[in-house]
Image (cartoon, rainbow, N blue to C red):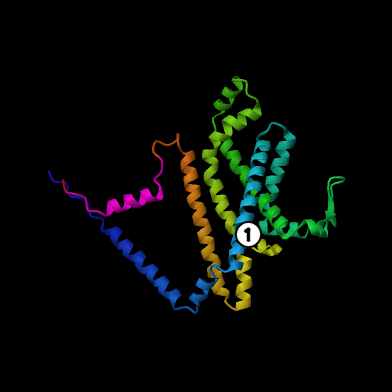
Amino acid sequence: MRAIPVRHYGRWVAAVVVVVLLGWLAYGFSQGKIIWSTVGDKLFDHTVLTGVWHTVLISVCAMAMGLVLGVLFAVMRLSRNPVTGAVSWLYIWFFRGTPVYVQLLMWFNLSLIFHTINLGPIYKNDTVAVMTPFVAALLGLGLNEGAYMAEIVRAGIQSVDEGQTEASHALGMTGAQTMRRIVLPQAMRVIIPPTGNEFINMLKTSSLVSVVQYSELLRATSDIGISSNAIMEMYFVASIWYLVLTSVFSVGQFYLERRYARGSLRSLPLTPWQKVRANLTTLRRPKVA
């Protein structure tokens, strides 16, 4: 008996349609009033590169702050102490319920409420001097991210079977030891994917901090665009850099997820190179048996 492979003509038709649409879109942009040479010239401009560095810096710092606060308030939320549970719920409710744009403005204008920050003998200074654009951006993004991370971490902790906790207590571990050595390592498999998505989102949300005069990527490109009358060209420069940053960190997220998936999946997901090889293999015509 000869097995004849089934031909999937619909796939080729769909591929041709998609290629035609992409070509039509590229042609449309090529005919627009866009000076593409300016995009290439300004892509590695010193001011733009400084803005890229500031974007990465504020995103990493805010995400680190959000992770610490997320773990802390997730543990507080799951605590049997009604006070810590209520405080955690109130924190999550407020920072998830108000726009991050408003929170940034509130931190930046904190001096309208408190003229000085007085911590007694520890620290005292004018609020204007303390609440710099970087500090305002860090607090606005970090505290907001902490509320979302608290829910992500809480879901990860609750995904671990309660028998793990009971077994660790039977071995004489304290609650803190159980959380640090048993629960959190197993919860990471659930926590990592949404955390990676949150960081990718943080890279883009960082564009909002231009409202507090922090010179990140969008503000740097906008300033150049206004001064050189190349507004749309500089928006393309910003978009290219955002795509580069999100792509790089998406690859890192993939490999991190793949690492923590070991032991829970029978076969690990294919790496990008393995997917390319598999697709190239499928393009070859199967041999007739």
Q: Amino acid at mark 1?
A: His
The percent coordinates of residue 287 (x first, y second) are 18, 49
Extreme residue in the left direction: 1
Tell me the element at label 1: helix
Q: Quadrant of the N terminus?
A: top left
Would you say 200 lies left or right of 268 here? right
Quarter the C terminus occupies: top left
**Mark 1 surroundings within 10 Å by alpha-carbon count, few (fewer than 14), some (14 through 19), many (20 or more):** some
Above or below, comparing residue 216 to residue 161 in the picture: below
Relative to 84, is 40 above or below? below
Is residue 139 left or right of 239 when viewed as pictured?
right
Identity of the residue drawn at 68% across and 50% down = 143
Tell me if residue 198 comes above or below residue 102 in the rendering.
above
**Residue 139 makes an appearance in the image:** yes
Q: Residue at x 68, y 47 (%)?
A: 93
Q: Range of the magenta residues?
A: 268-287
The part of the image, by quadrant, that contains residue 67 is top right
Residue in the foreground of this view, choosing between 129 and 2:
129
Read off the residue under disc 1: 54
Classified by dominant secondary structure, the portion drawn in magenta counts as helix
**Residue 159 shows in this picture:** no
Residue 240 percent across, percent down from the top left? 51, 65
**Residue 70 falls within the magenta-colored stretch:** no
- Residue lying furthest right in this view? 121
